[in-house]
Amino acid sequence: MNARGRSYRYVGPADLEAAVRPGSGGCRISSAADFGSWVAERSAAELAEPFTFVVGTDSMMRLAPRRSEHVACAGEISFIHEAGRWAVGEVSNQSTGYCPDVSSWSAVAPALDGTELGRPSDFTYEVVFRRCPECQEHNIVREDDFVYVFCGSDLPRSWNVDPAV
C-alpha cells in the first residue's frame, strides 16, 4: 500500500506471504470504465462483502474479492449502488499484512477520485497500528490506549510498524 511518499512493505505472517499466487495482485482500476467492467464480473455474494484494495506505487488502486486470500491487496472497501451510480460505502486501512498508517488516506483519496466513484472524505473506519518496542509484536491501538495489552509496554504515538521505514 502506498501513502504519498511512503510505501508499505508486507509485515504480516510469513505463511500467508508464501501462499501468494502469481497474478493474485488484484485488478488495476484507473477509471470509471475499469471499475464498471470489474464490478460487472462480481457475484452477488462478493458484492455483499467488503473487497480488499491496495494503492500501488503507481498511485493506481487494485481491487480483489475479500476471500481471494492474497496479500497483494491490503485495506478493505465496500461499494453501494444508488441513484444509478456506484460509490464507496465504507473504506478502511485495516490490513494485518501491511498495517498502514491512517495517513495512507492521502494516497487512497486520489486513487478513488481517478475512478470517478463517490467517496467519503476520509477512512470510514481507521485502524491505528503500532509495533511494540519491547516485544516487537504488532498491535492495534483501541480507544487511544497506547499500551500493548500483552506485555504492558507503552506504544509510540507515531507509526512504527515497519522497522525498515
Image (cartoon, rainbow, N blue to C red):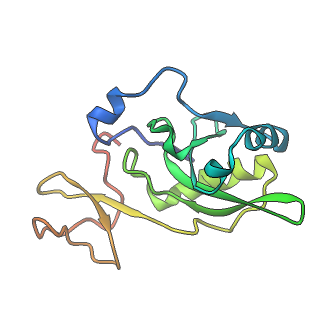
Q: Residue at x 51, y 40 (%)?
A: 73
Q: Residue at x 32, y 42 (%)?
A: 12
Q: Residue at x 66, y 52 (%)?
A: 47
Which residue is the extreme one toward the right? 84
Instruction: Please state which of residues 157 and 15 is positioned toward the viewer in this rendering.
Output: 15
Query: Residue 43, located in which quarter of the rendered image?
Result: top right
Q: Quadrant of the C terminus?
A: top left
123 sits to left or right of 144:
right
60 sits to left or right of 76:
right
Report x, y in % for residue 48: 63, 57
Q: Residue at x 77, y 46 (%)?
A: 114
Report x, y in % for residue 151: 10, 65
**Number of numbered discs overlaid on the protein picture:** 0
Report x, y in % for residue 148: 19, 67
Report x, y in % for residue 125: 52, 68
Which residue is the extreme one toward the top? 22
75 sits to left or right of 113:
left
Query: Residue 64, located in which quarter of the rendered image?
Result: top right
144 sits to left or right of 67:
left
Query: Residue 85, located in which quarter of the rendered image?
Result: bottom right
